[in-house]
Image: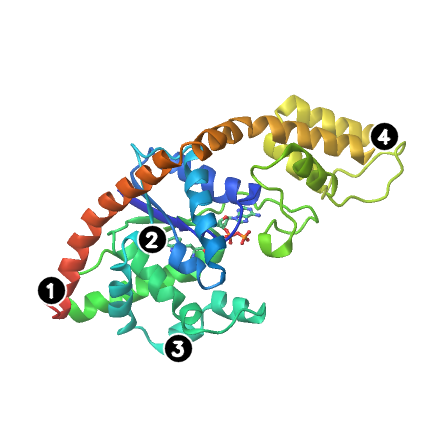
Amino acid sequence: MRILTGLQPSGKLHIGNYFGAMQPAVHLQDQGDAFYFIADYHAMTSMTDADTLRANIQDLAIDFLACGLDPDKATIFRQSDIPEVNELAWILSTVCPMGLLERAHSYKDKVAKGLDANHALFAYPTLMAADILLYDAELVPVGKDQKQHLEMTRDLAGKINDRFGDNTLTIPEVQIKENTAVVPGLDGQKMSKSYHNTIPLTGGKKAIRKAIMRIVTDSTPVEDPKPTEGSTVIALYKLFADESQLQQMIDDHEAGGFGYGDFKQRVFDVYWEHFAHVREKREELENNLDYVNQVIARGAEKARAESTKVLDRVRKAVGLR
Ligand code: ADP
Ligand code: TRP
């Protein structure tokens, strides 16, 4: 089974991205023929600085490997290494009604947040559909926010098949990661870089500790019992702590006599330990960028072998060849 998903290189990964996207991707690489790509064309819809984009692409490639994606199991590549994806996006756009794009939540949300309403942002769904259809992907695991984009992908593939023949494109199944908990941010809302409430996946000890100390809590005095229900400290601790550590944390909340500074220190300690391996691996890769670049180059070759096949088929079906 061909599994495919993409991540935008739009900033430093945070632990919400790790639990919501990276960890599931690492598990899935053992369950099928996995294609994971760095969605760099897509990132251009929100990023305007070339040097930052370049650095983010490199960073995400390192993160893919540091988090445990294995280039011997999965095809890891960069979207723009296969620029033919734009050709398929064009072909899809010829069957794509304006109304379908106008209904896209993601577009409407981004414009409401102040991003420029340019053509790329509007046409995002056709490029995303091409990302998926160019590789005959059968299963696409994504977060809930991407559900509509996947429905559009299936819709566009269906329209092409209706017009040009049933076997032109493979209609993918969607896997919505319903059971991946939404990781809360420092303020208790969903962790997201747009809310500036993130705990980065990697970084210096001091800076991360400082971030964790900013977790929003109530003002219960040290000696009093503290609420466990709806506690961001506990929700974050749960991601890393074992059962007995978690029980201790709950007991100490209920007993009183411990301050939030103490609890946050415990969150930091388990966090730091949990990602020790990722940090080490990152450091090793940062010192071996040739290897990282080789992985991405090899990924591009493997991806191209697939994309060429599919694009040939589509060109013939639609009459370009
Ligand atoms: P951000 O909200 O920080 O911009 P993205 O939208 O780029 O993050 O998300 C990239 C991936 O990480 C998606 O698969 C998304 O579902 C996942 N993800 C992002 N934030 C969280 C979170 N707080 N909890 C779980 N998964 C998340
Ligand atoms: N739009 C996705 C996001 O913002 C990233 C993405 C681009 C993607 N192309 C894709 C995900 C194809 C899955 C399949 O998270």
Residue under pointer 1: 316
Q: At 38% across and 69% down in the image, what residue appears?
A: 123
Q: Find the distance from the CA under tag 1 to the CA under tag 3.
A: 28 Å
Q: Position of residue 272 (x, y in %)?
A: 62, 29
297 left or right of 120 in image: left
Q: Quadrant of residue 119 in the image?
A: bottom left
Residue under pointer 3: 99
Ligand 2 neighbours mark 2 (CB distance < 8 Å): yes
Q: Residue lying furthest top in this view? A: 244
Say what secondary structure mark 1 lies in. Answer: helix
Q: Find the distance from the CA under tag 2 to the CA under tag 4.
A: 52 Å
- Dot 4, how many residues are within 10 Å of its Cα: few (below 14), some (14-19), or many (20+)? some
- Dot 3, how many residues are within 10 Å of its Cα: few (below 14), some (14-19), or many (20+)? few
92 left or right of 50 in image: left
Name which residue type carries label 1.
Lys
Name which residue type carries label 3.
Gly
Q: At 80% across and 35% down in the image, what residue appears?
A: 260
Name which residue type carries label 4.
Gly
Say what secondary structure mark 3 lies in. Answer: helix
Residue under pointer 4: 256
Give yes or no for contact between labels 3 and 2 (Cβ–Cβ under 8 Å). no
Compared to residue 239, the image places residue 164 above or below, namely below
Give yes or no for contact between labels 3 and 4 (Cβ–Cβ under 8 Å). no
Q: Evaluate whether residue 67 shows in this view.
A: no
**Foreground: disc 1 or disc 2:** 2
Q: Find the distance from the CA under tag 3 to the CA under tag 4.
A: 57 Å
